Image (spheres, rainbow, N blue to C red):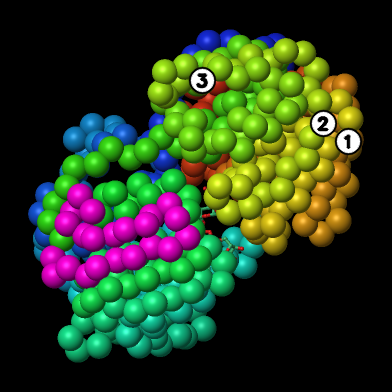
Amino acid sequence: MEYIRVRNRGPLEGRVTISGAKNAALPILAASLLGTEEIVLEQVPPLKDVEVMVDVLRALDVKVEYLDAETIRIDASQVNKTVTPGELMNRMRASFVVMGPLLTRLGRTFTQMPGGCNIGKRPVDLHLKGFKALGAEIDEEPDAVGAKAPDGGLVGGKVYLDFPSVGATQNIMMAATMARGESIIENAAKEPEITDLANFLNKMGAKVRGAGTSTITVQGVKKLHGARHVIIPDRIEASTFIVAAAMTGGTVEVQNVLSAHIRPILAKIQEVGVRIEENDDDTILVQSTGRLKATKIRTLPYPGFPTDVQAQFMALMCIAKGQSHVEETVFENRFMHVDELNKMGALIVTDGNEAVIRGVEHLVGAKVNATDLRAGAALVLAGLVADGETQVHNVFHLDRGYYRFEEKLKGLGADVERFVE
Ligand code: EPZ
């Protein structure tokens, strides 16, 4: 196992370049199953989760070739396997979004139920509700699920999502691309990764309208061809570095970020007293102006404050002057970083999905454990400002969602090193 050692070396200074978005790359890789001609994806982040999705595609007879570290060429013309390998589903629940493409392209699919994970139960009932609305027959077993399209293929239908689930919206949208007739997804998720997936599908010849709004309409087509696509920048990675710059009192230029995707973060980071300058179209300058002020955040589906930045922002609140408040409304168990931050001298009290943070002057370095990928990032950020040395263990969580995290932090002057225990 590996751990990251973090020492406080003062403000971060310099420029950091954001990689492609993990949560756009994963569904877009799954969507490549729909294509019968060559697909080339650029700015694909070389993350552990992306490697797993590539393994899933290869297990389904898709030819996947890396043209360079971040460019992938895909040939899914020979896809004919309908069963997703169970052990790969165990490694990454996001592989569940291959169900929609297989169901619409091959008429059937069978996959292991994705396990819950430590941030919540993570049910898939809304995914299955959508497939049923498109005429699929669902066969649920305790730890697996099969879906079968009617003989003539899926039929366009209408589904209301009780919660604007990102994964369900993606899975159903992909299944609808080759259903006969029109499909409508109501109360759809509006995250930028949904829009990026829709743009990719439309380049392949799909007819998806309304992505980014609560109502997505899809006109089914017979076939989807190839496409070339550049994955959007990762708004969560960008937000993580913005919070890091703010916490350390530094001046950092964050490059390759779409500020339209991180409005809640920009609003909240200015509320705590940090100066933000949006230069040309994809660079943001973050300048810390002294002791941070307390604030409150409430995580919500996009365009609200993203749950994936909740842990990082809580780390900032630990050293902000005054009493801050966090309400986590998306996942039922996403406060596991609280105990770890409190080991570093933070004063956080939780009650259900709410947390109250009393800002302290200094955190103290400690041995802590990452519990999920964003919590891991939050603990590294806390280590950047703590007195003494912090060791963040279970960093495999971090590698799932951050490409060269230590190198990028080192490039900004941070004292971070990875060790093998
Ligand atoms: C995506 O997960 C992201 N993962 C998550 O990022 C992110 O936190 C989440 O969206 C919310 O923004 C990927 O894109 C690979 P959901 P997803 O379905 O699709 C409930 C990270 O850190 N729900 O929007 O699984 C569910 O229980 C990861 O990169 C149902 O009830 O999220 C949860 O409470 C973590 N029934 C809520 O919706 C369903 O059928 C949000 O889940 C599906 C979901």
Q: Secondary structure at mark 1?
A: strand
Q: Dividing the image into four equal quarters, which quarter contains ligand 1?
A: bottom right
Please name the residue that numbered disc 2 is placed on: 294
Per the image, is 88 magenta?
Answer: no
- Give the mark nearest the N terminus, 1 or 2: 2
Instruction: Kindly identify the residue that appears in the image at 20 percent across and 50 percent down.
Output: 203
Q: Which residues are magenta?
A: 202-223
Query: Which of the 4 quarters of the picture holds residue 144?
Result: bottom left
CA distance separating discs 3 and 2 = 23 Å
- Give the mark nearest the N terminus, 1 or 3: 3
CA distance separating discs 1 and 3 = 29 Å
Q: Quadrant of the N terminus?
A: top right
CA distance separating discs 1 and 2 = 6 Å
Q: Secondary structure at mark 2?
A: loop
Nearer the observer, 206 or 400: 206
Residue mark closest to the camera, 3 vs 2: 3
- Give the mark nearest the N terminus, 3 or 2: 3
Please name the residue that numbered disc 3 is placed on: 278
Image coords of residue 113 (percent x, y) = 47, 73
Residue type, numbered disc 3: Glu
53 up-or-down from 229: above or below: below
Q: Are marks 1 and 2 in contact (CB under 8 Å)?
A: yes
Nearer the observer, 7 or 303: 303
Q: Secondary structure at mark 3?
A: strand
Nearer the observer, 99 or 342: 99
Image coords of residue 236 (percent x, y) = 53, 38
Instruction: Kindly identify the residue that appears in the image at 85 percent across and 34 percent down.
Output: 346
Please name the residue that numbered disc 1 is placed on: 323
Q: Which mark is residue 409?
A: none
